[in-house]
């Protein structure tokens, strides 16, 4: 402890005198509790979203509607829902945050839902994608996507484009079952035939036997869903076993062809067709501005769908703050419901009833451009509700 | 059919190379080293850095991965492990599992949490038609390399002076020391060899098993199964166990995919009921 000096006292006094004036120009900051997996197996999600929120603040300024947006970042490690819940509680009780945001995975978001309800604070889910999340609390809103939302389009696209029979290979966990169910239902409704349904264990050392099985079943296409890093392993085996030469198309949801790691997949990935709401190669001025801002903050990373969820989460919070001109949780929530804006991914809306995101979903093909791999969009399904 | 069998053999062989060091430390040196997988991970990362960043030829990366992890093993054995040989198994388990977490965090910090992906040379990718079924070239390569290692280890242990000294030291360290056998040096070399083999296994496995900072924990169970089923003090026992488990695992996933992950455990339980002391163990 330093003793109060005369200069310190003077400065303090001046600050006190100036305080009322300051309050008019700038009200107390809006604290946002951002909980992300910054370490552990899902650290990539945390790093993407963290970089996107920093890029957002750098581009749009920290002061919005006369208030400084103050982000309190917490690392939950990504695997223990209890930790996420505890961090959320601390942020609410001790740090007095007005908005909770982040949430890398479904169990983490579900564990925090009761806190948002009790504290009456908006909880902006920037990543987790299981459909049920917003039903768990009237204060949850989502700026990422839902699995059914991006799975249905590829099923229907496949049925429309000469794929008569399909096999599915999904990882054996809740999101995988979701994806399998939606694909099967939509593909069958559009006249397709399911040749084979396979589930691989979450901790799976080798995809070889599953892909051999697919090869022997000879479907027109193989739909895959897996945690994003695993995609590479499946694709390697897909090539090595010669499924491509056997005339089997590889299709899936876009998280398998994650922009963050797509380049390291190598030429094996070329031609893979996926459906998703965001590609870093999306052609629009908003996306050009977003990717430039992101690269300024994280020069060695390519923004992926997680990053755009974080960026849009910030837009949602800031725009709602402007509209409500208040930091009260219920007023912010009211301003967030039904809000529309032009995102780097295209036009999006937070549906007032479901508090989930309505957005365009794109069909994309992996192609090489200037020595790098990109998901190039070639078809679009407009305004898919979550 | 034959493709499934050969796939299973390849994956079993790989499992053996990863696990044989563990069977050596556990069976021969009576040390429970749960951090064994960390050496596999280290070898994998050595391969990734040399192959992908520095552009070394694939065949040069494999011995480099072996040597680097063997040196690392030697260093850790002299500085850390040697102090724990006489301690209880619980101490060893706590120490080595702590080492696993440290290794995982270090790998995360240095290389990032994502899956590492490598590009094999052209002569190792693709398939060949064997007339009776098609098989990936890399899998054939795996089978050949690993079979060579098994044969080398078995001959080394049975036919060389080093092998004889090692077996003597394990049977009774005090008497062996009394006969002038340098037991600590022997253990250090053995430990380094085991670590090096794990590193080699990790390097060979990047293409098939993947590689990320959770690798040591992810495959620890498989390695322990191999050692448990095979018995901890031979080379051929774990080799046979790894082969059997590899084939059962792959075949099970092919024919009964809905049971997926459980088959390997069922096989383990069945084998342990039949041969509780290990596949090749003589009844005591």
Image (cartoon, coloured by chain):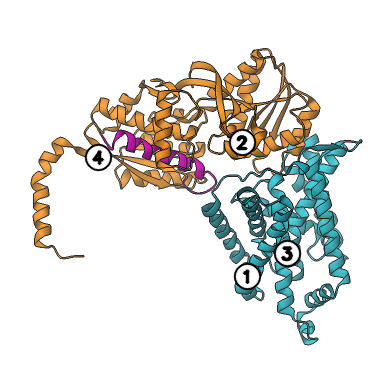
Chain colours: A orange, B cyan
Residue B118 x %, y %: 66, 45
Observer able to see residue A230: yes
Disc 3 designates what residue?
Answer: B194
Q: CA distance from mark 1 to mark 2?
A: 41 Å
Which corner quadrant holds the N terminus of chain A?
bottom left
Question: In the figure, is residue A28 to the left or right of A17?
Answer: right
Disc 4: CA contacts within 10 A as few (<14), some (14-19) or many (>=20): some
Residue B72 x %, y %: 64, 65
Disc 2 designates what residue?
Answer: A173
Marks 3,4: beta carbons within 8 A? no
Question: In the figure, is residue B226 to the left or right of A384?
Answer: right
Q: Chain of mark 4?
A: A
Say which of marks 4 and 1 sits in front.
1
Residue B156 x %, y %: 84, 68
In terms of depth relative to the viewer, which is nearer, B28 or A181? B28
Assign the magenta stretch its main secondary structure: helix
In terms of depth relative to the viewer, which is nearer, B208 or B37? B208
Above-or-below relation of B43 to A96: below
Q: Residue at x 60, y 71 (%)?
A: B80
Q: Residue at x 85, y 58 (%)?
A: B279
Q: Earlier in the sequence, mark 3 or mark 1?
A: 1
- Residue interval drawn in magenta: A38-63
């Amino acid at each position: 402890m330093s003793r109060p000096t005369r200069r310190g006292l003077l400065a303090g006094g001046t600050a006190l005198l100036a305080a009322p004036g300051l309050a008019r120009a700038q009200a107390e900051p809006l604290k946002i509790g951002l909980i992300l997996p910054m370490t552990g197996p899902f650290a990539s999600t945390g790093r993407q979203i963290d970089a996107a929120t920093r890029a957002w603040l750098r581009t749009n300024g920290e002061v919005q509607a006369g208030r400084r947006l103050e982000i309190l970042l917490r690392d939950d490690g990504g695997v223990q829902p209890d930790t996420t819940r505890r961090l959320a509680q601390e942020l609410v009780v001790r740090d007095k945050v007005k908005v909770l945001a982040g949430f890398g995975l479904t169990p983490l978001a579900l564990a925090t839902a009761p806190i948002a309800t009790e504290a009456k604070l908006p909880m902006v889910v920037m990543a987790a994608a299981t459909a049920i999340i917003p039903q768990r609390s009237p204060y949850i809103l989502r700026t990422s996507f839902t699995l059914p939302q991006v799975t249905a389009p590829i099923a229907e696209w496949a049925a429309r484009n000469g794929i008569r029979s399909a096999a599915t290979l999904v990882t054996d966990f809740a999101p995988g079952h979701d994806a399998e169910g939606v694909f099967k239902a939509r593909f069958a409704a559009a006249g397709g035939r399911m040749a084979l349904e396979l589930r691989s264990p979450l901790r799976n050392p080798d995809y070889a036997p599953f892909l051999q099985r697919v090869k022997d079943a000879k479907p027109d296409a193989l739909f895959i869903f897996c945690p994003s890093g695993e995609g590479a392993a499946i694709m390697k085996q897909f090539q090595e076993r010669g499924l491509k030469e056997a005339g089997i198309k590889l299709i899936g949801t876009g998280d398998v062809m994650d922009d963050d790691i797509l380049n390291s997949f190598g030429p094996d990935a070329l031609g893979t067709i996926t459906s998703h709401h965001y590609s870093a190669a999306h052609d629009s001025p908003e996306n050009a501005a977003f990717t430039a801002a992101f690269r300024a903050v994280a020069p060695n990373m390519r923004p992926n769908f997680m990053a755009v969820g974080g960026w849009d989460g910030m837009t949602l919070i800031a725009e709602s703050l402007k509209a409500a001109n208040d930091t009260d949780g219920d007023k912010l929530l009211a301003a967030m419901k039904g809000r529309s804006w032009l995102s780097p991914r295209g036009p999006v809306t937070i549906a007032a009833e479901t508090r989930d995101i309505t957005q365009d979903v794109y069909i994309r093909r992996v192609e090489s451009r200037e020595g790098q791999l990109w998901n190039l969009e070639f078809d679009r399904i407009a305004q898919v509700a979550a | 059919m034959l493709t499934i069998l050969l796939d299973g053999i390849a994956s079993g062989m790989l499992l053996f190379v990863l696990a044989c060091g563990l069977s050596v430390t556990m069976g021969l040196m009576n040390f429970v080293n749960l951090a064994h997988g960390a050496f596999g991970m280290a070898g994998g990362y050595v391969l990734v850095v040399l192959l992908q960043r520095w552009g070394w030829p694939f065949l040069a990366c494999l011995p480099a991965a072996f040597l680097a992890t063997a040196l690392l093993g030697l260093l850790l054995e002299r500085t850390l492990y040697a102090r724990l040989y006489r301690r209880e198994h619980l101490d060893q388990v706590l120490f080595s599992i702590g080492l696993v977490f440290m290794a995982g965090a270090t790998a995360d910090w240095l290389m990032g949490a994502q899956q590492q992906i490598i590009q094999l040379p052209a002569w190792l990718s693709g398939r060949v038609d064997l007339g009776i079924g098609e098989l990936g070239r890399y899998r054939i390569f795996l089978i050949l390399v690993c079979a060579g290692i098994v044969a080398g280890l078995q001959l080394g242990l049975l036919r060389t002076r080093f092998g004889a000294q090692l077996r003597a030291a394990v049977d009774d360290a005090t008497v062996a020391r009394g006969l002038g056998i340098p037991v600590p040096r022997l253990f250090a070399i053995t430990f380094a060899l085991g670590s090096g083999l794990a590193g080699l296994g990790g390097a060979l496995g990047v293409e098939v098993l993947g590689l990320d900072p959770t690798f040591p924990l992810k495959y620890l169970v498989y390695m322990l199964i191999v050692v448990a089923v095979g018995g901890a003090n031979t080379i051929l026992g774990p080799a046979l166990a790894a082969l059997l488990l590899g084939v059962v695992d792959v075949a099970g996933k092919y024919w009964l995919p809905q049971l997926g992950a459980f088959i390997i455990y069922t096989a383990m339980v069945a084998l342990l009921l039949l041969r509780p002391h290990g596949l090749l163990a003589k009844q005591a």
